[in-house]
Image (cartoon, rainbow, N blue to C red):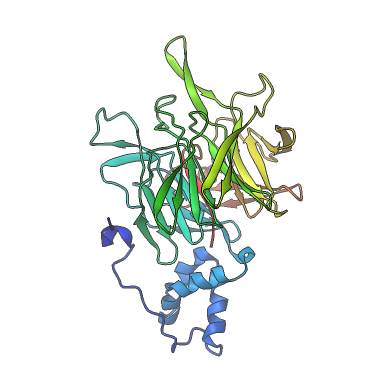
Amino acid sequence: MPLPPSLSSPSLRPRPRVDHSCTLIPGLPNDVAALILSFVPYPQIPRLKSTCKSWYAFLSSKTLMSLRHRRHTNSLSHLLCIFPEDPSISNPYLFDPETLSWLSLPFMPCNPHVYGLCNFAAVALGPYLYVLGGSAFDTRSYPLDRPMPSSSAFRYNFVNSTWERLAPMLSSRGSFACAAMPGSNRIIVAGGGSRHTLFGAAGSRMSSVEMYDVERDEWMAMDGLPRFRAGCVGFLVWDGEETEFWVMGGYGGSRTVSGILPVDEYYRDAVVMELRSSDGGGKWRLIGDMWGQGERARLGKIVAIDEGDRGKVAFFMLDGDQILRYEMDSNRWRKESTLPRKAPYDRSFGFIALNGELHVMSLLDGFKTRPQEKGKSMMSQIYHPRKKIWRSLVSRPPFIGKLDFRTSAMCSVRL
């Protein structure tokens, strides 16, 4: 069902048409001027729209995004998209680490009966941003304090700056593994449940797997996981000939301490499915424990980086103040490096891969800073796996409240 105009568009003003008779930059042909403007960092584009009518028309047209993606892929900006909290009360933001600039995106058109959405997946595919599933509270359900999984799917179009509602998933889920398949314009999701951040071990677990076809706007069921698995992460691995979908970590069953306190049973292994273009996917195979007996209870935050060597992917995990690298041959995590600047363990960290680098983000109020700067800045400690070097940058996020990386959703976008 199409969204009302007030929800699907940030403004009711009609989109201007590009008048090719107007001059974009005096003294230059319009095609050359348009190519120059296409190199402007994406978060800076809204500021330039007020320059003149011709710039507003061009920077609001589909031609701009088409030119940006027509250039070499490596020339696209690597941006960070952050959902600070429940999308119904806080809009997402784009952050450009190169220019330290922020851009606010329109509010996501949430259901008015649902609140407290969390544990959803945000993934980018081309000039689109997809928001899938999650756990939330529904005012129409009883009891009100029980979280419910969601099957909703939304897409933000960076070409026309609008949200649209997509076909819902076959199964409602939150805290699930998700990965985009750029070559085939598909998105695959696996596992999940109804767990909410306010309820520790409460909620259901599931093993179902499904794939979304972007062109057809439909979901297709696939072979389920060997076991129930929620709170897991998913990545695509391509070795030059075949593509595999890896699902790591997560939790399955639960136990109680002293018969009262529920505790999750975390997995220390992974499962892998070979993806085929003909029928979607094959059978799952199990990758054994990634830790020795008694070494670790659960996996930390995991990200993947494409090393550019025939599609080879490297996995990295943030474990306290250390970054670990996964060795596929030995099926073990080894120490890669240590954060140059440590923070108290009660602080939350964001961990994401951008442009071949690992970004470890934290608020500066976790460090010893001047009182007037407390809580106003975000530090990113950036590690380059190939060069084995660290660098850092500090930015001032536009968030009204504090950013909790334990509950916020993040993904990388190339525009």
In what quadrant of the picture does the N terminus appear? Answer: bottom left
What x and y, as percent, mark residue 292? Answer: 69, 23
Q: In front: 268, or 242? A: 242
Residue 401 in the figure: left or right of residue 247: left
Q: In front: 214, or 193? A: 214
- Which residue extends farthest left? 140
Q: Residue at x 49, y 26 (%)?
A: 252
Q: Residue at x 73, y 34 (%)?
A: 334
Q: Residue at x 40, y 37 (%)?
A: 173
Q: Is residue 146 visible?
A: yes
297 over 349 or under it: above or below:
above
Q: Is residue 40 visible?
A: no
Query: In which quarter of the view is residue 414 placed?
Result: bottom right
What x and y, as percent, mark residue 311? Answer: 67, 52
What x and y, as percent, mark residue 208? Answer: 45, 36
- Which residue extends farthest right? 387
- Which residue extends farthest top? 258
What x and y, as percent, mark residue 265? Answer: 52, 22
Count of numbered circles in the view: 0
Q: In front: 92, or 228? A: 228
Query: In which quarter of the view is residue 326 placed?
Result: top right
250 over 61 or under it: above or below:
above
